[in-house]
Image (cartoon, rainbow, N blue to C red):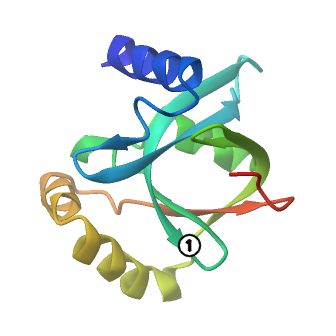
Amino acid sequence: MKFFMAMHAFIYRLTGGKIGSTMGGLKVLLISTKGRKSGKTHTNPVNYFERDNGYLIVASNAGRPSHPAWYHNLKANPQVTVQIKDGIFPATAEIIASDQRASTWKVVIDAAPAYAGYESRTSREIPLVLLRPQDKPRL
């Protein structure tokens, strides 16, 4: 899986998102986080949904029992870099609060029903994260 994700990010960057900006009918962005332990930059392709002047991403980890590493990294340092197609911009990651999660999760499930399957396979609550651009992105 790590190899696939690295190749996806490489091809996305190489083509400015001409290849890799959608997967399974969903939009894909690249999120770059600073490793909470290593301090190194890590980039991952993630599905996104446009919402509230930002970009909603789901830390589903395909329904695995643990959160994805990028989620732990952005919790430690919410300043991230986002690439959507050939546009690259800094953003701040905000974890959706409990009181807003149910209505936001419904939006995700309505747009991408596969996430309901991920939810049913895991005992953890799947975090939702809103990426708020720090500057108006050039897309």
**In this view, 18 is above or below 62:** above
Would residue 77 be visible to someone looking at this image? no
Residue at (51% x, 88% y) in the render: 99
Q: Position of residue 16 (x, y in %)?
A: 58, 29
Horizontal side of residue 24 vs 121, given as left or right: right
Q: Point out the image quarter for the N terminus.
A: top left
Residue at (45% x, 61% y) in the render: 127
Q: Residue furthest right?
A: 135
Front-most of residues 134 and 128:
134
**In this view, 92 is above or below 77:** below
**In this view, 75 is above or below 19:** below
Front-most of residues 31 and 14:
14
Front-most of residues 59 and 85:
85
For label 1, count other residues whose C-alpha is less than 10 Å away and answer few (under 14), some (14-19) or many (20+): some
Would residue 112 be visible to someone looking at this image? yes
Front-most of residues 14 and 91:
14
Horizontal side of residue 42 vs 113, given as left or right: right
Residue occupied by mark 1 = 96
Secondary structure state at the residue bearing disc 1: loop
Q: Position of residue 69 (x, y in %)?
A: 51, 33
Residue flagged by tag 1: what amino acid is it?
Ile
Q: Position of residue 130 (x, y in %)?
A: 60, 65
Report which quarter residue 74 is drawn in.
top right
